[in-house]
């Protein structure tokens, strides 16, 4: 397969092409458009969105975020220890200058990633110097992220993609940036949190609010991980796009009836 190499029960990820918004299914495009409009016209603040996330978890509205295979995977999936976006939000508040200025060169971009990694975890969390993999499952299988020899080129491509951001498809580009950051996995740890931080920074031109996705990614981990893997392995982007959009609607307090009507 072009996106990965399979060796026994070990999956080795390979670089793959960025998606085009025109390749999404029609219902995904509708949901994407409505979600971007929601972000543009609504300003409720970080704390209210965190409260909405807590309420969605308590009332089991997060079931909307499940993948069709979640029931099979939930008992086996390695749990995340990160249930809060507080450190991301703190870094976001104090990050100066704006994100676009960090994209002016490869060096400034990689330096900013390294700085963010240390701030959202600890000083030991730097750019990786070797290959990195997931925790092995019960059969010993694991996924190894792109080879260290490809990391610099992958990050340079990510920076170039970010520079093409535009208002018309800002949400789509921000989601893709976040997903491809996790695919590159440049940090020793905290790549998911860093990806959601950069997702918000990419959205800065249409939203002043920090969108706390981490709370819902923690509560609906299998939905998040399975949708990511579909993008990584098969270049199937619809489910991860829908996952992000549905998270945003839950955080902004959309009702289940409203959300179901958009599915």
Image: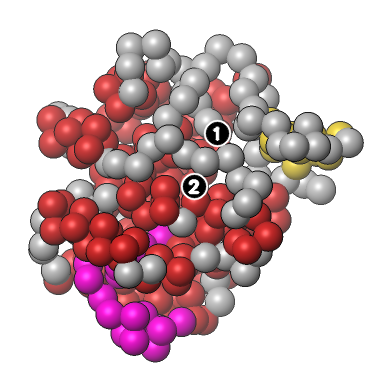
Describe the element under mark 1 as helix, strand or loop. helix
Q: Residues within 10 Å of mark 1 (few under 14, many from 20)?
A: many
Which residue is drawn at the image coordinates 17% and 33% (left, top)?
A: 90
- Is residue 35 something one can see in this rendering? yes
| 42 to 49, vertically: above or below | below
* Residue range corresponding to the magenta coloring: 244-263
- Residue 251 belongs to the span the image colors magenta: yes
Which residue is drawn at the image coordinates 60% and 61% (left, top)?
A: 70
| 37 to 14, vertically: above or below | below
Q: Nearer the viewer, residue 87 or 155?
A: 87
- Residue 126 belongs to the span the image colors magenta: no
Q: Which residue is mark 1?
A: 184
Q: Which residue is mark 2?
A: 179
Quarter residue 249 falls in: bottom left
Q: Nearer the viewer, residue 80 or 169?
A: 80
- Is residue 235 something one can see in this rendering? no
Which residue is drawn at the image coordinates 58% and 40% (left, top)?
A: 78
Which residue is drawn at the image coordinates 34% and 61% (left, top)?
A: 57
Describe the element under mark 2 as helix, strand or loop. helix
Left-right relation of 184 to 164: right
Q: Residues within 10 Å of mark 2 (few under 14, many from 20)?
A: many
């Amino acid at each position: 397969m072009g996106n990965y190499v399979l060796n026994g029960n070990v999956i080795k990820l390979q670089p793959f092409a960025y998606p085009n918004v025109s390749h999404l299914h029609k219902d995904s495009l509708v949901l994407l458009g409505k979600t971007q409009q929601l972000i543009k016209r609504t300003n409720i603040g970080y704390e209210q969105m965190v409260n909405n996330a807590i309420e969605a978890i308590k009332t089991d509205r997060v079931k909307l975020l499940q993948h069709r295979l979640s029931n099979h995977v939930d008992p086996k999936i390695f749990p995340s220890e990160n249930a809060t976006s507080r450190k991301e939000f703190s870094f976001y508040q104090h990050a100066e200058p704006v994100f676009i200025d960090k994209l002016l060169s490869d060096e400034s971009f990689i330096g900013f990633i390294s700085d963010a990694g240390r701030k959202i975890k600890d000083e030991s969390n730097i750019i990786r110097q070797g290959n990195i993999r997931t925790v092995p499952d019960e059969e010993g299988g694991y996924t190894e992220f792109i080879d260290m020899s490809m990391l610099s080129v992958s990050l340079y491509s990510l920076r170039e993609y970010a520079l093409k951001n535009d208002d018309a498809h800002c949400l789509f580009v921000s989601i893709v940036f976040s997903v491809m950051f996790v695919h590159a996995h440049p940090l020793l740890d905290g790549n998911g949190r860093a990806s959601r931080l950069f997702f918000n920074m990419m959205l800065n031109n249409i939203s002043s609010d920090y969108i706390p996705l981490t709370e819902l990614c923690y509560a609906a981990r299998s939905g998040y991980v399975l949708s990511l893997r579909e993008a990584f392995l098969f270049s199937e982007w619809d489910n991860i796009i829908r996952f992000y959009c549905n998270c945003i609607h839950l955080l902004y307090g959309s009702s289940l009836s409203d959300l179901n009507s958009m599915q």
